[in-house]
Amino acid sequence: MVLIVLSVLIGIVGYSAAPASAAPPSQPDLRGYLAVIPDAFVMNDEAYFQTPDGLLCSIQPDRGVAGCDGRLPGTMNGVNEIVLTEDANARGLRETASSRFVKSTGDAAPVLREGQKIVFGDFECAVAPGPFTACTKGQPVTQWMVVSPNGTGIGPATDGLPPGFPDPNEFVLGDETYVVGQGAKNLFPLFTVDGGLTCSIIVYSGGEIGCDGPLPGVTSGQNEVFMQLPGTSGIRRADSPKFSTPAYPGPIKQLPVGYRVNGIGSTCMAIPGGVACLGTIAGALHGFQVSPAGVSTIGG
């Protein structure tokens, strides 16, 4: 295998991809809302409420999570949950059959009316006409979510990304597993994406993420893009492709455009015509993007 420096081979390529949703929403200002007495909303140290437009929401301080289940305006069909948490692998938009914010026992959750907010733990959630639902975490606020026809999503943007690089917050996490076959220590997702690439996230306490297949703009035979955690990132020629051969037999599924799949401390996002992957180790961000415009890397 021969490693070729990307800047020599294909030049500097700008980051461009269509995200799953609009840009991250601005931080909502919840100071003008009327705070309700939370007692009627609380069950087992968690607060549950409905919104006038039918969302089922919860604040779960002991888990460090808040969010809502239901049809989310301004998102793709099938997206039915938004999660606000510091856990980068868990936060954002979801398509799931396992609703985590629905009150499971007793009477239905009370309705939080327009103009009201509930303050519970270090979270605040408010409802306004629009319909509009927003939650913030922390004082001062460090994270937030907004559900609105004008844009549904999580803020702020993921730290450290180059301008225009796809943000995992804007991609949908589904229930689908992309681990191929069954066997001992079979932990690593392997999948195809738009543009003919086959990719795998092979990360435990460290490892490698990469894709095999056609690399746009590459004319010298390189057919594999990779990042090592820890280590370098780049492209190379692979006579025995590392990322497209499953350890156990089974069908390889395609990751739909606008969706993401997670590994340990890492994620890959399906973009039109390609993929963008990120991984973090020892606080350092690494990544690569393959799009019709070319190949680019972060870190390494």
Image (cartoon, grey):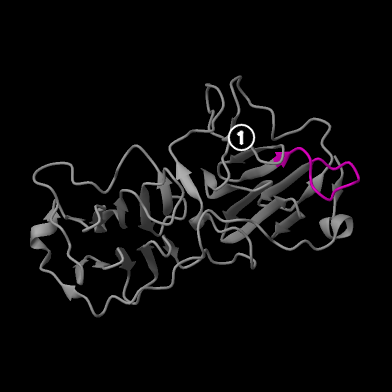
Q: Is mark 1 on a helix, strand or loop?
A: strand
Residue type beneath disc 1: Phe
Magenta stretch, residue numbers: 211-223
Identify the residue under disc 1.
Answer: 191
Q: Position of residue 55 (x, y in %)?
A: 26, 53
Q: Quadrant of residue 141?
A: bottom left
Q: In this view, does 280 lie above or below 180?
A: below
Q: Quadrant of residue 64?
A: bottom left
Q: Is the magenta stretch mostly helix, strand or loop?
A: loop
Q: Where is residue 247 in the image (x, y as percent from the top left)?
A: 63, 25
In the orientation shown, which residue stands out farthest toward the right? Answer: 220
- For this rendering, which residue is in front, 238 or 36? 36
Q: How crowded is mark 1: few (under 14 residues within 10 Å), some or many (20 or more)?
A: many
- At a point 73% along the width and 53% down the height, the residue shown is 232
The reply, left or right, for residue 239 in relation to residue 266 is: right
- For this rendering, which residue is in front, 162 or 23? 23
Q: Position of residue 24 (x, y in %)?
A: 48, 65
- At a point 32% along the width and 70% down the height, the residue shown is 138
Q: Position of residue 101 (x, y in %)?
A: 26, 49
Q: Is residue 175 visible?
A: yes
